[in-house]
Amino acid sequence: MTASVITGRLWRNDRFLRLWFGITVSSVGTYLSIFALPTIAITLLHAQPYQIGILGAAEFIAAPFVGFLAGGFVDRHPTRLISVIADFARVATLASIPIAFATHNLTLWQLYAVSGVNGGLSALFGAGILRLYRVVVRREDLVEASIKLSASQAIGELGGPSLAGVLITRVGAPLAIVADAVSYLVSGLMILSLPGHNMSATPRPFDGHATWKTDATDGIRFIRSRPMLWRLLVATSILNFTFQMTMANWLVFAYGRLGQTPETVGLLTGLGELGAFLGIVLALPLARGIGTGWMLIIATLIGTLARCLIPLTLLGNPRMVIFASMFATGLSTTFLILTSSSLWQSLTPIELLGRVSAARYAVLTASIALGLLIGGALGSAIGVLPVLIIGAALTPLSALVWFGVPLRKVYEPMADDFVDLTPASGPTEM
């Protein structure tokens, strides 16, 4: 598995390397903002748990609606241009935060607006970037690409919070947001530099009609027609919901009840994400040995352990427990991503990839938004600690989705499930 990250044919694929570099840099910036935005709200604007829930949910409220419509739009228009515009627009929205702070006009409402607009732009970008990867990566290299992309996420999870903690302490949280804006600028420039032409051919839609209504439903209907993809979507949505219930209260708990500083929490969160790198090393050998179905169960159990550890920080040595919890979170998340991402790519026809990706993104972001809103509301109503316990208790429910399914056969692609529309030599246009 490690060899798949540091070696492989994709190191000779210039277009993939440019995309990969841009995504890696923007991943660090994204995780920086995930940490920095609520820190701004808590430390500068004195936000309560329900307001942190709203702030987190704002990023995902617009995404389901944009996502459903973005898929068909991306499938029919120049993908590279769409992705570049989405990146540069996110640069502008993030830049408004330090400007507002410098002029003493920063409010929670602006943070809500920036989070919401960027959520919609991320949905548009996400639908486009997956199609770009299918253009620049051959079918036989999809697993290697998934491993490298997971490494990028692990780097973001490791570097983002740590960098955020240091920048927040040294220059302040609003100025730390500038680093995220720069990361999106780099990503956009890398995509803009890709050689080749934009995809301009109009693919045939799923049901033969190219309307906004069918664009919004084609993706979800395709997922519903593939039982394993549908089960995966439901299980992941449950995990997202319970995790975000916890996250809506986590920083309030860490700064308030535990008395930790942003720098300490950011550093421990970043170091804990070493678990993601361990997941990259272990995922493929484990999947080959026990099957990807059991890998999903293992990921759920490790995720449950991660949630259970958070309330235990009150019993002593909170820094060590925070590290252990974040380590387990990184490990479980990486297992889940690596056992599913290449299957989403390989089992979806390229002509539908934009719509299927958008539908998947819409459902998952809706589960995230609900988790943040409900978690934040409960945190204000009954206290942050009970919500942390409830989130841990609900996490194993995602494993019930696989009840009655032969786990050794989960995600084994069937011949009639795969539609290969990519030439064996790989696509030549973008």
Image (spheres, helix red, strand yellow):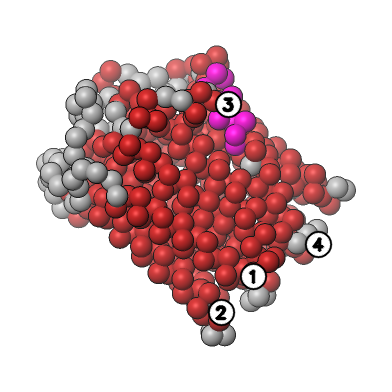
Q: Are marks 3 and 1 in contact (CB under 8 Å)?
A: no
Name the spot of residue 207 as percent of width and height, x first.
Answer: 16, 40
Q: Are marks 2 and 3 in contact (CB under 8 Å)?
A: no
| Residue named by callout 1 | 172
Q: Nearer the viewer, residue 48 or 13?
A: 13
Sequence-wise first label, 1 or 4? 1
Mark 2–mark 4 distance (CA, rounded to whole Å):
25 Å
The secondary structure type at the circle numbered 3 is helix
| Residue named by callout 3 | 281
Residue type, label 1: Gly
Q: Are marks 1 and 4 in contact (CB under 8 Å)?
A: no
Mark 2–mark 3 distance (CA, rounded to whole Å):
42 Å
| Residue named by callout 2 | 101
Q: Nearer the viewer, residue 191 or 372?
A: 191
Q: Residue at x 35, y 55 (%)?
A: 188
Mark 3–mark 1 distance (CA, rounded to whole Å):
36 Å
Q: Nearer the viewer, mark 3 or mark 1?
A: 1
Residue type, label 4: Gly
Q: Are marks 2 and 4 in contact (CB under 8 Å)?
A: no
Residue type, label 2: Phe
Q: Residue at x 61, y 45 (%)?
A: 158
Which residues lie in the magenta part? 276-286
